[in-house]
């Protein structure tokens, strides 16, 4: 049975919590003292559209990455599996951080909903022994 490296859990936790911490600091520390949004109302729709597009593309690509990386391989090296997981998480983290920045600039609390969804998806994408067995990571 394959063993999941501890550092992979640490990387997963850090990538998942970075956007959450940014949003929490923005919400609880920065926004209470700031009265005016940095984005004009007419520009807000553009930022929200770009954030939504990035989220959809990030989620789609993060689901396709394993198929491309593991395609045609009977035994996947552990390093390749780790790289694939980090790329999956990075796609979602980038989208989540952009949504966090839009929230910071616009003060629109509804931006926290897609941010929370992306963070939850990242939580579900944690490395598991079952996934490693399915991809035959490090197997012979």
Image (spheres, rainbow, N blue to C red):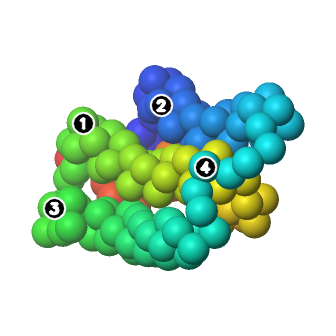
What whole-number distance in Å separates the C-alpha atoms at marks 1 and 4?
Answer: 43 Å
* Circle 2 residues within 10 Å: few <14, some 14–19, many ≥20: some
Element type at mark 4:
loop
* Circle 4 residues within 10 Å: few <14, some 14–19, many ≥20: few
Q: Which residue is mark 4?
A: 38
Residue 90 position in % (x across, y down): 39, 47
* Circle 3 residues within 10 Å: few <14, some 14–19, many ≥20: few
* Residue ID at (77%, 38%): 34
The quarter holding residue 48 reads bottom right
Mark 2 vs mark 4, foreground winner is 4
Element type at mark 1:
helix
Mark 3 vs mark 1, foreground winner is 1
Q: Is residue 113 visible?
A: yes
Q: Is residue 34 left or right of residue 60?
A: right
23 w.r.t. 52: above or below: above
- In this rendered view, identify the residue nearer to me: 107 or 111: 107
Element type at mark 2:
helix
The quarter holding residue 112 reads bottom right
Residue 135 position in % (x across, y down): 33, 58
Residue lying farthest to the left in this orientation: 72
- In this rendered view, identify the residue nearer to me: 103 or 113: 103
Mark 1 vs mark 4, foreground winner is 4
Q: Residue 54 got which mark?
A: none
What whole-number distance in Å separates the C-alpha atoms at marks 3 and 4?
Answer: 49 Å
Residue 68 position in % (x across, y down): 21, 67
Q: Is residue 53 left or right of residue 104?
A: left
CB within 8 Å, label 1 to label 4:
no
Q: Residue 73 got which mark?
A: 3
Q: Upstream in the sequence, badge 2 or badge 1?
A: 2
* Residue ID at (64%, 46%): 104
Q: Which residue is mark 2?
A: 11
* Circle 1 residues within 10 Å: few <14, some 14–19, many ≥20: few
């Amino acid at each position: 049975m394959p063993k999941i490296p501890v550092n992979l859990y640490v990387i997963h936790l850090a990538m998942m919590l970075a956007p959450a911490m940014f949003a929490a600091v923005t919400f609880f520390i920065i926004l209470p003292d700031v009265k005016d949004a940095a984005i004009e109302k007419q520009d807000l729709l553009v930022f929200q559209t770009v954030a939504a597009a990035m989220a959809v593309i990030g989620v789609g690509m993060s689901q396709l990455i394993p198929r491309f990386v593991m395609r045609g391989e009977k035994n996947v090296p552990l390093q390749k599996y780790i790289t694939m997981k980090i790329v999956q998480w990075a796609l979602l983290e980038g989208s989540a951080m952009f949504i966090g920045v839009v929230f910071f600039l616009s003060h629109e609390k509804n931006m926290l909903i897609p941010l929370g969804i992306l963070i939850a998806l990242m939580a579900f994408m944690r490395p598991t022994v079952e996934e490693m067995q399915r991809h035959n990571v490090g197997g012979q």
